[in-house]
Image (cartoon, rainbow, N blue to C red):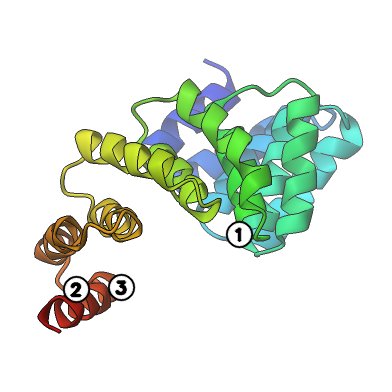
Amino acid sequence: MDLIKQGLDLMKDQKLDEAAQKFNDHIEANPEDPIGYINFGNLLIHIKEYNRAKRFFEKALSLDETLPTAHYGLGNVHFEEEQYAEATQHFQEAMKQGLDEADVYLMLGMSLMNQEKPKLALPYLQRASELNEKDIDIQFQYGLSLAYANLIDEAHEQFQIVLELDEEHSDAHYNMGVTYLYKKQPQEALTHFNRALEIQPEHLLAGNAKQQVEEALNE
């Protein structure tokens, strides 16, 4: 078994120090192979050592600037550091170089959402949702982008999909309630705000919304 495969298996088992050693051994034996640097960079993101991770991805790109996974990794570093414009550039480059997976569409969409560009984010999050229909986070983020783009009916349907995947998703219940308010159906909204609070009693947004709806209904 090669060192990269051993390192990846160790990462899956949360044996991160041992995984790092395997990746390091691969780099020492193959200093011109960018794959070692990419995998070490991914491990460093996992332990939130973003500055070190950035150096590993940049080293990989200095060896081969067309590597999509290196651009994706560097995009993740910038995203974690809230540098969303830079993240966007690297996720776009990863796609340009052939990366066609749900995660890169998700991250590009979320980078654009964080730059308050929901309409630009929409097609990427939609594509992510198509590529991974069972991923709850992807489906939820797509629902949020629809809501922020004022596509309320479509957002409502999307949050329903999330709740079919996870009936205990408190944020989906809250956002479903908000769509019902837009539809001028306060009783249905209240049902979902209450459900969100049953699941997560400290859900501040649901608590505030519940209070406002109840006050309006009592007037």
- 25 and 46: which one is in front? 46
Does label 2 or label 3 sit earlier along the sequence?
A: 3
Residue drawn at the location 58% of the way across and 52% of the way down: 45
In the picture provided, is 54 more to the left or to the right than 123? right
Q: Crowding at label 2, few (<14), some or many (≥20) Cα neighbours within 10 Å?
A: many
User: Is label 2 in a helix, a strand or a loop?
Assistant: helix
Residue that sits furthest to the top in the current view: 1
> How far is the residue under mark 3 from the one under mark 1?
24 Å
Residue type, label 1 = Glu
Q: Is residue 162 left or right of residue 118?
A: left
Foreground mark, 2 or 1?
Answer: 2
Residue 158 is drawn in which quadrant?
top left
Q: Which residue is mark 1?
A: 80
Packing grade of label 3 (10 A; few <14, some 14-19, many >=20) is: some
Mark 2–mark 1 Cα distance, whole angstroms, equals 33 Å
Image coordinates of residue 197 in percent, x first then y, are 15, 67
Judging by the rendered image, the residue that carries numbered circle 2 is 210
Residue depicted at 20% across the width and 79% down the height:
216
Type of residue at label 3? Leu
> Residue 205 has which mark?
3
Q: Is residue 15 visible?
A: no
Q: x, y percentage for residue 118? A: 61, 51
